[in-house]
Every structure is written in C-alpha cells, then in structure tokens.
Amino acid sequence: MTETSFDFDLIVIGAGYGGFDAAKHAADHGLKVAIVESRDMGGTCVNRGCVPSKALLAASGRVRELADAEHLSAFGIHAAPVRFERKKIADHANNLVATIRSNLTKTLERAGVEILYGIGRLEGFQKVGLREKNGVDRIFTSRDVILATGSDPFVPPGIETDGRTVFTSDEAVNLEWLPRWIGIIGSGYIGLEFADVYSALGSEVTMIEALDRVMPTFDPDIAKMASRNLLDRRDIDARAGCIARKVSPGCPVKVELADMETKEFVEELELDAVLVATGRIPSSNALNLESVSVKTVKGFIPIDDSMRVLVNGDPIPHLWAVGDVTGKLMLAHTAAAQGAFAVENILGNKKVINYQNIPAATFTHPEISSVGLSELDAKSLSSEKGFKLGIVRSYFKANSKALAELESDGLMKLLFRKDNGLILGAHIYGLHAADLIQEVANALSRGQSVIELAEEVHTHPTLSEVVEVAYKQAVKQVENQ
C-alpha cells in the first residue's frame, strides 16, 4: 500500500522499454505507479528505433530476395522485375509503430499505471516535477523514482542536419523519400541496417567510417566475412579512416572528407542525402540531477548493478536509473531487464544484472549477433586469470539447412576456457544469427560448460546445428574432463 506521505510508491520518468517494464512490473506487484513521458509511449525503440527499422528491413529484405535473379534461378525460379511502393513500405512501418504504441498504453492502463504526459525532472529527493504541454507545472512525491529517459542520436560537430537531406535514424525510419545516392556516416549496427534498407530499395550507398576499419565494433573475423557480403557484393562504397568534418544540407548535400589521422582534406562529395549514424548520447540534461547532487559521466547516470543511482560511488536511497541513460548496454532488451530488476530491488528482492549474458544483434540480411566477451577481452582475461583460451569456428557452409536455403555464407566463433570448458562468448554472422545467439546466451547465463552442452541433441536439419558443431569442436580441446 502507498505510504500516506507520498503521492505514489513509484514514479518512472520515461516510457521507453525500460520505463514500461519497470512501471508494469511494479503495478503488477501492487505498487501505486505513475509514468511520465514527454513524447510518445514506447520511447525510441517503438517510435524511432527497433520497431520501425525492423519493419523497413522486413519489407526491403523481400525486395532484395525477389530482385536477386541469380539466387532465385539456382532454385529454378524466374521472377518478373520487382516493383514496390515506397509509401506503402513506410506505411507498414508507421502502422506497426501505432499498433505497438497503442498496445503498450493499454497494457499500462489495465495494470493501473497513471500515465502523465509532459517533461519530467527531479525536484530533490523523492520529488518529481512535471511540466505539462500546456505549460502547467506540477510536483509529485514518490517513495521511489526510476529515471529512464533514454538517448538521442549523436551528431558530431561540423555536421548540420535539416531532417530532410541530412538526417539521423529518427527521421530515416519514416522513409519519406529514396535518395539516388546516400552517404551513411558510421558503420555500426544503425549504419549497417540502413545500408541494407537503402541498397535493397535501389539507392547507391557510400559508407564513411572514422576508425581504421569498417565495422570496428564487431569481431574482426565476423566483420571480414560480413563486410564482404553486406558491403562489397552490394557495391557499397565503404571508406574507413575518414571523417566527415563538414556536412551541409541542400541539393546536393556537400560532404567534406578528411583523413582521420592527419585531419587533412581528402575530397568533397556531393550526395542526394546523408544519414548520420554515429551513435547515441544520453538524454539526461533536463532531469535536474544537480538537485540530488548526481554528476553524470559524459551525460550517463552512474549506477551499480542493482540500478541504484550513485553519488561519489555511494547509492542514493530510493533513486534508480535504467536503460540508455545509464550507458551500460544501449539495447531495448537490456533496458527492459534493468527496469524489472530495479523494481525487484525496490520490493526488497536483491537482484543484480550481469551484462555479459545479454546478447546483441544487427538485423541485416544475413544477421550478425554476439554475446559475452570479445576475443580481445577474452585473451586479456585468460592472461590475467592464467587459463588457456579456446577458440573454435563453425561454418554455415557445412550446415544442411543453410545449404538448402542457398545461404551458406556464415560463421560462428565460440570462445571458451580450456581448463573447464566454460563459455566466455560467441559471435555469429549468418542466416538467423539473431535467433541462434540466444542458445549461447542462455548457456552463458547458466554457467554451462561445453562438456555438457556438446551432449545436447539438436534438431536436424536446422541452423541450430551450427551451434552444436561448435560445442563438439570445443569439447575436444577441454583439458580436464
């Protein structure tokens, strides 16, 4: 029951997936809950991220499949020239967003959560201010407060956006037009996914990456194979070691490229459009964190593994933060897990989160996924702890299902300890990699060894046998069996 001195047991500021899961979980456990949202229910993921982008990828992926005459002819299929309607593809994404946003809203309302629209902020300990859209300002008290304000696209200095010819992923998901030639700044998961969409729909793509190799955040072996298929074979011009030091909107968009190391001018491109996919920054400026003496780290709110907000390393009572604004793993499912764990701790059930067990995926065609440690981090850990690192590779070209689909370009890399067989991480590129990684994530979460995993029977013929082969290869290298 709510303490009489507070308006609510819990106020959540931000209604993305982290805030949504926290609010629903708390309401389901009998707390009086309010959630504050300044824009649309569902936050970035539902409205400007995961959901609409996957709808675009689904539609453009169909176009790519139907337009690949060589691939279809190998099946004995001959299709007519592909036609598509850009607006209907965009409408598919928009309709999906509206449906999921409505579903989330109804779910919270049924759970008894009070939805407050406006800009939320802290007004000291256990106090939340709300500036409504009509200008009315209100202050509520709450026993506990969760900050879940998410993130926004990062636009580097020198790049001017107009939302039409130079834009971020926030605008790209609307697919208002298809440029003939688009530059994509950044080769992380956002840049790769939109390169997949635009190239499938007929746009010429130039990818600009500041670091010394394209796809720098991915495992090098995975990146090598993926870039060969996702970029080279699609005639995507990928330029590494270059920065777009100046981007000016217009017709055409002018992009001034410079060498990353020397900062010297390289060339000027004139493109139809530019997508800025250079990462995301936390949305914490409007939270009035100074009212509770919280100092951010590059805008991120410091938390412990229980999601408690920290000041000088010590937790603040009754203040929590989840999702992108914490900078831990900027993924929707991470935010959702953090939200539920935060509420569990509010309820007195001590829960901590292990980010190493949370998988990530890039939904290109084919997909890329990973969980656990990178090879570099695994090598560092093996040196520090004094164990031998095991690395095995399992290839899709030996998998019956992948061969049947004529999609045999793929690789799984498994990292494990040779002394006891415990899994440290996995990286996959190939057909349905985003689904396959969950099996490894579950094994990692349970602390399982390849010794027991190698005995599990996988359905034949399925792609899951790629994982099975990796386990069986790994168990041969385990020293103590």
Image (tube, helix red, strand yellow):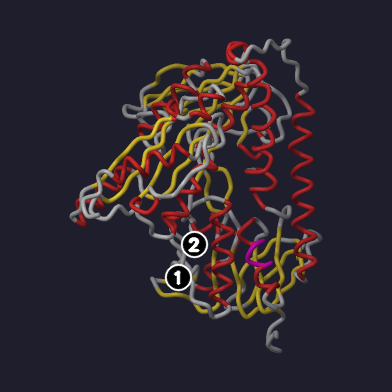
Residue at the bottom extreme? 4
Q: Residue at coordinates 52% horizontally, 22% vertically from top-left?
A: 255
- In the rendered structure, which amino acid carries the disc numbered 1? Leu
* Residue closer to the observer: 192 or 474: 474
**Which quarter of the figure has residue 476?**
top left
Q: CA distance from mark 1 to mark 2?
A: 8 Å
* Numbered badge on residue 310: 1
258 horizontally vs 326: left or right: left
* Residue shown at the point (57%, 43%) measured from the top left: 153
Question: Is 475 rendered above or below residue 156?
Answer: below
| Circles 1 and 2: CB atoms closer than 8 Å | no
- Which quadrant of the figure contains the N terminus? bottom right
How many residues crowd mark 1 within 10 Å: few (<14), some (14–19), many (20+)? many
Q: Amino acid at mark 2?
A: Ile
Q: Give the labeled residue for mark 2.
A: 301
Per the picture, the main secondary structure of the magenta-coloured stretch is helix
Which element carries disc 2, helix, strand or loop? Answer: loop
Residue 215: quarter of image: top left
* Residue 437 part of the magenta segment: no
Q: Position of residue 360 (x, y in %)?
A: 50, 46
Specify the segment rendered in magenta. 20-24
